[in-house]
Amino acid sequence: LEHLEVEERVLEQELASVRRSIESVGATEDLAALRTQAAALAEKKGQRQRGEAEPPGLQFTSGPFRLLVGRSAAENDTLLRRFVRGNDTWVHARDYPGAYVFIRSIPGKSVPLETLIDAACLAIHFSKGRGSGQGDVYYTQVKYLRRARDAKAGLVLPTQEKNLHVRLDPQVLQRLFGSYCNSSPIPYTS
């Protein structure tokens, strides 16, 4: 229910953004500006038609890195199959079902500890272990994940994984929810 409420706020913010765009087009009398806006909308529409869709789930930023969060088995599987690459980092709460968090890699940069801790906090926050306020996570690069044969969607077998123990920090979660990428910031609710 909490995730649906977050999704509802996101959709309301997107609708408000579209309404502002419509108002700005109606208020613009400059032909060149209208052509620029029309070209931008056509390009966006073309990207959607070519299958360059936004990844499912939630997106956050931690420094220059983008964090993708799949909240269900279907979102986890879709992210894993279509939106991440081998050098991206996978983070998941150990011993609890829940979200996969992917840290998108940046060529020539290694993932800093702060970003890894941010991803770990999100993994714990969006897992069944959230109530304990702390937990173990494990992480590895996506290229070291193997999908389990004949298993449910989203189930993977990691190799070369490393462990990290984190405590949920409300300030870290507040900062991350303030960096929510799909639209303007949404409030963190504990």
Image (tube, grey):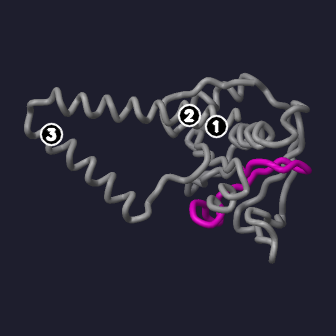
Q: Which residue is mark 1?
A: 4
Front one among 130 and 164: 130
Which of discs 3 and 2 lies nearer the camera? The answer is 2
Labels 1 & 2 near each other (Cβ < 8 A): yes
Which of discs 3 and 1 lies nearer the camera? The answer is 1
Q: Which residue is mark 3?
A: 34
- Check the image and report above or below for 160 versus 14: below
Image position, residue 59 (x, y; %): 58, 43
What is the C-alpha distance between the residues marked 1 and 2?
6 Å
Q: Secondary structure at mark 2?
A: helix
Q: Secondary structure at mark 1?
A: helix
Task: Residue type at mark 2: give it.
Answer: Glu
Task: Residue type at mark 1: give it.
Answer: Leu
Image position, residue 181 (x, y; %): 52, 38
Front one among 3 and 186: 3
Write the start and end of the magenta stretch as one range.
80-100
